[in-house]
Image (tube, rainbow, N blue to C red):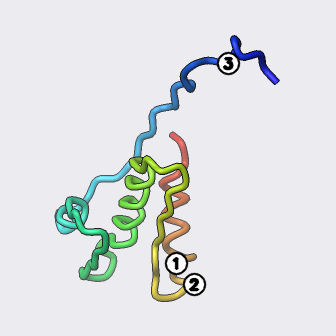
Amino acid sequence: MLPAESVPDHPPPSPELVLDYRAREQFFGFHKRAARFACIVTHRRAGKTVACINELQHAAIACARLRGRFAYLAPYLKQYGDVGLSARRRRAIPR
């Protein structure tokens, strides 16, 4: 246990977090919405999963709650594992 006088009054500065994501034009409205829920209808390989995961990352970073909860839903568990987790891992690697 540290003595009270050696504990700093403020937390140490957190490292700068840079998210490598540029929204495509069809997702501008999705990212600017104020509604809690959204539905995206675009063609295959338009980047829906990437847009959703980046939206969750931005919301988690901006969340002031101690234990905020966020979710990404996919039609099938295997689809989420194949697409969602690999996209999240690629984007979470520090540069």
Quick one: label 3 or label 1, which is nearer the N terminus?
3
Residue 80 x, y percent position in the rendering: 52, 78
- Quadrant of the rendering where the N terminus is positioned: top right
The residue pinned by badge 1 equals 80
The residue pinned by badge 3 equals 7
At label 1, which amino acid type do we have?
Tyr
Instruction: Name the residue located 42 percent from the left edge and 50 percent from the top edge.
Output: 63
Does residue 24 appear to the left or right of 21 in the view shown?
A: left
Circle 2: element type: helix
Looking at the image, do the residues carrying marks 2 and 1 touch, with CB atoms under 8 Å apart?
yes
At label 2, which amino acid type do we have?
Lys
Instruction: Name the residue located 57 percent from the left edge and 84 percent from the top edge.
Output: 78
Nearest to viewer (mark 2 / mark 3): 3
Nearest to viewer (mark 3 / mark 1): 3
Instruction: Name the residue located 52 percent from the left edge and 88 percent from the top edge.
Output: 76
Mark pair 2, 3: CA separation: 47 Å
Whether residue 42 is situated above or below residue 1 in the rendered picture? below
Residue 15 x, y percent position in the rendering: 51, 31
Disc 3 crowd rating (10 Å Cα; few below 14, some 14-19, many 20+) is few
Disc 1 crowd rating (10 Å Cα; few below 14, some 14-19, many 20+) is some
Q: In this orientation, which residue lies closer to the viewer: 44 or 76? A: 76
Disc 2 crowd rating (10 Å Cα; few below 14, some 14-19, many 20+) is few
Quick one: label 2 or label 3, which is nearer the N terminus?
3
Does residue 1 appear to the left or right of 65 in the view shown?
A: right
Looking at the image, do the residues carrying marks 3 and 1 touch, with CB atoms under 8 Å apart?
no
Circle 3: element type: loop
